Image: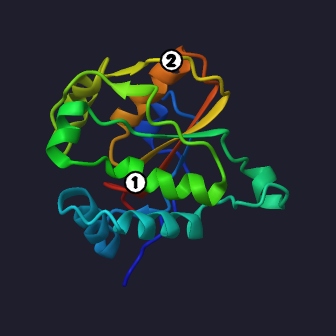
Amino acid sequence: MEYTPTQHKLLCGNCLSHQYFYDKVYSPYTYAYDIRYIITKLKYHKKIHLAKILAELFTQQAPFSAAQDNEESQLYPLPQLIIPMPMHTKRLRERGYNQALEISRFLASYYQLPLDYKHFVRTRYTQLQAGLAASERQKNVANAFTVKKPLNYNHIALVDDVMTTGSTVNEAAKILKKNGIKQVDVWTIARAGVKH
C-alpha cells in the first residue's frame, strides 16, 4: 500500500491572506492513493473497522506521542480534549455513523485523552462540501455549529477525516474560540488539494 506523508512547512499566499481561527493542523497524509481509498470506504461504504487503521496511520506520523514526558510531547503538547467534527442529525441518520467520531475513539484511547462528542454540535443542515468552490464552502458552513454546554478546557483537538480548503474546521474553531477555548488544533488523516 502507498501512503504519502505531507511535506509542507511554509504558508502559502492563500493562508497568509485569510483569517484562521485554528492554531495548528496535523494532516500527516495527502488525500491520494490508498489513503483516499480507505477513507472513501469508511465514509461511504460502511467499513467502520477502517477507522482504527486510519487512526493508527495518524499516530505513526503525528509529531507527538502518547508518552507525556518525552521530548516530542514537550515540543508538540497534546490537547486536553478530543472533539470529533460533528455531523448534523439528519446526515447522521442517512449515513448511520460519524466517521470522525469513529476515528476519534481510537485516537482518544491511544493518547489517553477524554473524548466529547455531545456538547459541540452541528445545528444547521448543509450541503456536502465536496464539489463546492472555496467561497461557496465558507458560506455553506457559516453559523452551522453550536456549543451546547461550556467546555472547561483551554486546548482541544478537532478531528476529521480530510481537510480540503479548511472552511469547515475554521468555522468550527471560530465557534469554539468564541466559547472560551484558547487553542484549537485540527487533526485530520489527510489533506486534499495540496500541491507539492
Q: Residues within 10 Å of mark 2 (few under 14, many from 20)?
A: few
Q: Is residue 45 visible?
A: yes
Q: Position of residue 86 (x, y in %)?
A: 36, 35
Identify the element where label 1 is drawn: helix
Image quadrant occupied by the C terminus: bottom left
Q: Position of residue 170 (x, y in %)?
A: 42, 31
Q: Residue at x 83, y 61 (%)?
A: 70
Quadrant hosting residue 139: top left
Quadrant hosting residue 15: top left
- Residue furthest to the bottom in view is 1
The dot on residue 149 is 2
On screen, residue 73 versus residue 183, left or right, reads right
Amino acid type of disc 1?
Answer: Glu
In terms of sequence position, does the residue under pointer 2 or pointer 1 come before the other?
Answer: 1
Q: Position of residue 13 (x, y in %)?
A: 44, 39
Q: Residues within 10 Å of mark 1 (few under 14, many from 20)?
A: many
The dot on residue 139 is none
Image quadrant occupied by the N terminus: bottom left
Quadrant hosting residue 33: bottom left
Amino acid type of disc 2?
Answer: Lys
The dot on residue 102 is 1
Q: Position of residue 112 (x, y in %)?
A: 66, 53
Separation of residues labelled 2 and 1 (CA atoms) = 22 Å
Q: Residue at x 52, y 15 (%)?
A: 178
